[in-house]
Image (spheres, rainbow, N blue to C red):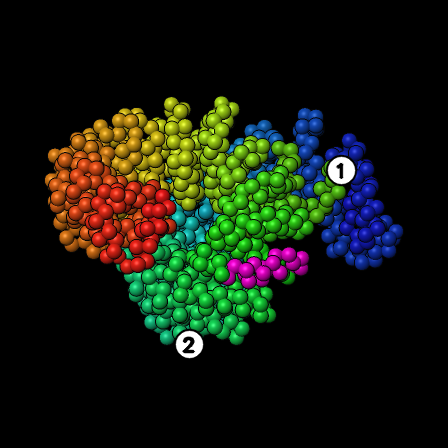
Amino acid sequence: MTEELEQILSQLTQPDNAVIQQATAELKQAFKDPAIIPALCAVMSGSQNPQVLCEIEREKGFYWLSCPPCKLYLTLQIRQSAAVMLRLRVKKHWKKIIPNDRESLKAVVLQAFMQETEHTVQHSLSQLCAVMVKHETPDHWPALLQLLNESTKSSNPNDRQVGLLLLNKVVESNPESFKPHYRQLLQLLATVLQDVNNPTALYYSILTLTAITAYSGTEEMNQMRSIIPSLIVALKHLIKANEDQASEAMEVFNELMESEVSIIVPHVADIVSFCLEVGSDTTLDDSLRVKALSCIAFLIKLKSKTVMKQKLLNPILQSIFPVLSAAPPPGEEDPEDEENDDGGEPANDNPKHCAAQIIDTMALHMPPEKLFQQLMPLTQACLTSGDPYQRKGGLMCLAVLAEGCADHIRTNMLSSVLQTVCQSLSDNNQVVRSAGLFALGQFSEHLQPDISKYCSELMPLLLGYLSSLNQAKVGHVTKAFYALENFMENLGTDIEPYLPTLMETMLSALNNADNLKIKELAVSAIGAIANAAKELLVPYFPPVIESLKGFLTTTTEEMRSLQTQSLDTLSVLARTIGKDVFSPLAAECVQLGLNLTDTIDDPDLRRCTYSLYSSVSTVSPECLTPHLVAITTVMMLALKSNEGITAHLEEDKTFVLLDDDDDDDHEEEKDVSDFLEDDSETDVHDVAGFSVENAYIDEKEDACDALGEIAFNTGTAFQPFLESSFQQVYEMRDFPHDDVRRAAFGALGQFCQAQHKVWKENPTEANHQALHKLLDVVLPCFLAAIKTELERHVVMGILETMNGVVKSCQGEVFKNPERLKEISYAIRDVLKKKTACQDSGGDDADDDEQQAEYDAMLLEFAGEGIPLVASSVPADSFAPFLNDLLPLIMSKAKSSCTVADRSFSVGTIGEILQALVSVSGGRGLAGRLSNRLLPVLVAGVRDSDPEVRNNSVFGLGSLAEAAGPIIVSDYPMMLSVFSNLLAKESDLRVIDNLCAALCRMIMSNVDAVPLEQVVPALVAHLPLKEDMEENKTVFKCLAMVYTHTPALIVKQMKPIVGSSSHVLGNKNVDEEAQNTLVMLIKEFAQHHSADFHTAVTSLPGEQQAKLSAAISAS
């Protein structure tokens, strides 16, 4: 059969489709013969038969094969093909091969490997060995170990190189099975890494080291640490020999950092120095420089404290600033400055982008005070430079700092950096102006709400850019829209004066612009305007919808991007324009979404329909009910689908079809589903890597978000789909992409809240059991992920979701007796920085140590859970856990802590006390805690920051309300503190909270407060100016005092009536507060009519009418 097989394989190499098809059919038939494996072995070992070639030449007339090199090439191809096919056969049918044949095969393969001289065939043979090692551990294949030992230690450099190739492939295929040999392996690798004149040997050694890193244990640590210096030297030599191989080999650093970062900590300075040297070298290929700079960013993300302790911040900044601010080669532009026809996103895989990414990572993971001290001098030097690319670099630096250091910038330098950015918008160089727009967009996104105060300065500048829409380059206009959108989105009603100009500009662009990208930008901007303007946009709603209709129903590919953006904006309008305005369109919107997903196969478009259904569910959930089967089906398919994930195969898999009779797919790239749905013996070695299209990731994320929100909003109607949706979303919690994991956890929480709502509306035992079945799966999964999840923002999302579940479901969460302890311990672990996503610096975190703002934010999400737990269980049950948690919260109130920390600390204390007001045993616990908490809160009232003062005042009022008579002895001191504050306080929100705190003290212990002095002072500061929620507290108190001491309130009738006209009919004041006030006003009108009449007639006519209407309406 051997000769026949050789002939078939040689025919497969001919440039004739008919010949290839005939050979393929013959080969499929041959594969059914049990003798195929011995025949493949024979061909693989010795296809040297020139007679076969001659016959083919004569028979087919391929005279080009008559030259000896072509013959050699053909025999090489035949041997390689035989090795590949044998690997595929062995991979799937190893268990079917009888033991004796397995032993023969192992011997034949090693023999073929030893005698083979061609590298490509050696490579295929080594992969065949790798597949066999997956089934036969090395200890069951002593001949392999012997060959590896002899070849890797050979004095012949070529033999060593081939031995290391084989070692790399077999270790990569089954790293754990080699664990008993790691020490010996590491000794070998340490030796080979000294052989700097054999770059191929270096390459395979480093790949082998990368493969075993994740599996190495404490016993190998010292050996691995000692290898690092040689590894760096080896990489330097490999770069000179082969940049592509060096780039791949540098993955070893990422693997070391991710698997066992302590190995590299002693060598961090050397690794950083090496990566900076490579990243800064403009003679090297960009991909290699990107790899080096990415290593630094990854190191900072994982071990920022080590980087700072080893004083590496300054050297990194000194090296990357020249990269960040470098001018492109003559005649070229940076990718982000190139004018794309469609204004699309530029590629981000270049050194300049990586340099910015390093600063971005620093901002997210380092204390801003320490970072800015070293960063700002370099930034200032760039900003004042005569070189436009230096100025651009300075602006890019400011832009990427905005997310991670938002508090620091807002508190210390907002005015000055805004001035810098605004000046750049009139720079004579467009490169600088574009960078300025990007920076302004970043500021607008991350520095809210403070940046909105500069509305009158910034809006005219941005509107000026839009006035020349058709003249400017699309790329530049895109950046202007980015800045404008982010700025407008958070303006709220402050957008009103600009609405006519904005909407005229946008509607004009929709109707007249020739460029589809400009139309798309205008549609997106209308969404941002709607987020700010809400009901103020109603007059513009008809023309907007009219324009969108034309884009929404298009079927042409070039309009697709505009169509998806129109869907996104339609979703925003559904949430913002008001139920009465949008409801008539709701059913039509659902039908539109279903029609689009039926007719167009596009992940972006499907994603936008999910958001649309979600938005409609907030306005008219009943419109979704008839279509829930179709809607949930398409979303579940999106979650299950492997579409968009491509497995790239290492070599031509033309022969895959030969191994499966029913498999006719022989493309070089197979869809990943072929791998995922295969049996467990799929050879990962076939896969060189996976690539994922972002659109499919975004679709999964949005499907999770939408399923959660729709489940909650449609309630009982969603019940038939809850279990299947839950199971599919639950699978996503381990998805490789972090945004999908975060969305999945969020949806799981919403499913719990949805089931709780259904149970509350229909309190059957079945609904109750269904709720607990969900909680018993979801909460343990949250708690496990908080501990082990590596991505900080995913843990923030889980904490936020868990807080939402506790807030909604309250006591039901804690029916399981272990749950209170588990949730309390999870919060404690985050506050103590003991979770996987927190870099504790390798030692106990120092409370006074400065930290990155996002690290502080993570603690805040955990802290927010404490009052929610406190309000859900009896105080005595929570007391032991609260005693553990409070010191961790109180430690953040020290004067040495940041404003954000101090505000968080006293704010959390206030919320805990407020929670104790309404739970069993809360008063006693609050009383017991008062001696610990009073000093912290009183110190906070005297803080220099208004937010800290505000939260402290709220905390003192809540303490009075929660502890009741227990703290009466402290009232004189508290009243004195409040009196002193009221005399000098200028912040309106603090004054509002002060009024509310006095009211809580009065309601808690009316006889302990000198009402004659306090009530007039309180009434003098009405109406409340900023904290409208506290109107409920204030008017409840005034009503109570009226019952207790009517004469005192009657004396204050005029200012009370005057302030009431600002409260009644105010949509920002809740119904309960307004009803309390109306009852009080009615009392005045009925029992003190003369005084009331005097008070009312002193008001302006409009306010009089409002009062009369409110009284008569109730």
Residue 455 higher or lower than 308, as above or below: below
Q: Quadrant of the C terminus?
A: top left
Q: Residue at x 70, y 36 (%)?
A: 89
Residue 662, numbered label = 1
* Snapshot quadrant of residue 443: bottom left
Tell me the element at label 2: loop
Q: Quadrant of the N terminus?
A: top right
- Crowd class of label 1 (few under 14; some 14 to 19; many from 20; radius 10 Å): few
Magenta stretch: includes residue 879: no
From this viewpoint, is residue 925 visible? Answer: yes
Coordinates of residue 734 in the picture (x, y in percent): 51, 38
* Snapshot quadrant of residue 492: bottom left
Total residue callouts:
2
Of 419 and 705, which appears nearest the observer? 705
Residue type highlighted by circle 2: Asn
User: As drawn, which residue projects farthest toward the right?
Assistant: 59
Magenta stretch: includes residue 550: yes
Please state the extent of the stretch shown in magenta in the rendering. 540-557
Tell me the element at label 1: loop
Residue matched to label 2 = 428
User: Left of 811 or right of it: where is 43?
Assistant: right
Q: CA distance from mark 2 to mark 1?
A: 66 Å
- Crowd class of label 2 (few under 14; some 14 to 19; many from 20; radius 10 Å): few
Coordinates of residue 971 in the picture (x, y in percent): 14, 38
Q: Residue at x 35, y 68 (%)?
A: 457
| Residues at discs 2 and 1 in contact (Cβ within 8 Å) | no
